[in-house]
């Protein structure tokens, strides 16, 4: 019996030691998990710093500014050279021009590309030449996200091109060489297309587009007839307004007429 008790006592001690060992082993993964969490936090922190860098790079917005103005001038022949000279002065250029000649008027349109930094100042100076604008419209479009995306696509395609060139150097057969050269031709075509898109966006953000339309009124038989018709209309409207005024003043008219009639009757009685 005594031997059995000693055996049980030893078994309990062994079991306690085994449990403590298991607990100590189980505590190690917990520490590892903590370290993993810390490493994740560190990665997230690095990502936040990277995002901050990207945000600072995007701080310079890519804006496309376009506008149009319209005004009347006494002489298109004299106004056009002045506008051309001012476009050259602001280091811009004319991308298109159109002339129209109608029965009652003629007009001229210039599409000018002006450096974006000088766009607002240019419009102020143009308004001095025009005197005043009949209409003015200015719009701004933000293409920053599109620009950044296009740059990223161009970078990725150039990396693919580098990989193809590395593979081409290791090609051992003619078939392998031809296959890689075909892939290189395709990726280079894609690179040129993306570069063209990027160049277009750079041009749009470097130069603003302003459509300048101005017109000159001409005297003609049609204008003379139209002026006569307008005069007749205005005369008829004036006549109607007089009748309306008379209708409002009918009480005073009745009083005046009654007074005159009464006065006339008194004069006749005296005679």
Image (cartoon, rainbow, N blue to C red):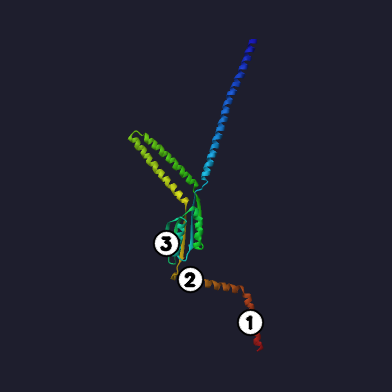
Quadrant containing the C terminus in the rendered view: bottom right
Quadrant containing the N terminus in the rendered view: top right
**Helix, strand, or loop for circle 2?**
helix
In this view, 147 is above or below 175: below
Residue on which the image places disc 3: 99
In this view, 102 is above or below 119: below
Between the C-alphas of marks 2 and 3, the distance is: 26 Å
| Residue at (33, 35) in percent of width and height | 175
- In the image as oriented, which residue stretches furthest toward the bottom? 271
**Helix, strand, or loop for circle 3?**
strand
- In the image as oriented, which residue stretches furthest toward the front? 89
In this view, 261 is above or below 114: below
Residue on which the image places disc 2: 227
**Residue 187 occupies which quadrant of the picture?**
top left
* Labelled disc at residue 56: none
**Helix, strand, or loop for circle 1?**
helix
Q: In front: 91, or 240?
A: 91
Q: Position of residue 177 (x, y in %)?
A: 35, 36
Between the C-alphas of marks 2 and 1, the distance is: 43 Å
| Residue at (52, 71) in percent of width and height | 234
Between the C-alphas of marks 1 and 3, the distance is: 68 Å
* Labelled disc at residue 260: 1
Dot 1 or dot 3, earlier in sequence: 3
- In the image as oriented, which residue stretches furthest toward the left? 174
């Amino acid at each position: 019996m005594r031997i059995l008790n000693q055996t049980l006592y030893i078994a309990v001690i062994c079991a306690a030691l085994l449990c403590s060992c298991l607990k100590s082993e189980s505590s190690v993964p917990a520490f590892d998990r903590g370290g993993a969490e810390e490493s994740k936090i560190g990665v997230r922190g690095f990502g936040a710093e990277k995002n901050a860098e990207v945000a600072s790079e995007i701080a310079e917005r890519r804006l496309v500014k376009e506008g149009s103005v319209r005004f009347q001038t006494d002489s298109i022949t004299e106004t056009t050279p002045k506008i051309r000279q001012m476009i050259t002065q602001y280091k811009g250029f004319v991308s298109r021009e159109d002339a129209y000649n109608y029965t009652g008027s003629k007009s001229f349109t210039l599409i000018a590309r002006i450096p974006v930094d000088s766009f607002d100042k240019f419009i102020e100076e143009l308004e001095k030449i025009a005197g005043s604008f009949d209409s003015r419209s200015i719009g701004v479009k933000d293409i920053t996200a599109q620009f950044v995306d296009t740059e990223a696509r161009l970078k990725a395609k150039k990396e693919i091109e580098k990989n193809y060139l590395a593979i081409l150097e290791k090609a051992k057969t003619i078939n392998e060489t031809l296959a890689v050269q075909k892939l290189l031709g395709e990726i280079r075509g894609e690179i040129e297309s993306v570069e063209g898109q990027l160049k277009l966006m750079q041009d749009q953000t470097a130069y603003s587009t302003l459509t300048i339309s101005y017109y000159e009124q001409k005297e003609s038989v049609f204008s003379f007839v139209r002026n006569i018709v307008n005069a007749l209309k205005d005369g008829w409207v004036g006549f109607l307004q007089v009748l309306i005024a008379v209708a409002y003043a009918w009480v005073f008219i009745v009083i005046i007429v009654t007074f005159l009639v009464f006065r006339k009757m008194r004069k006749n009685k005296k005679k």
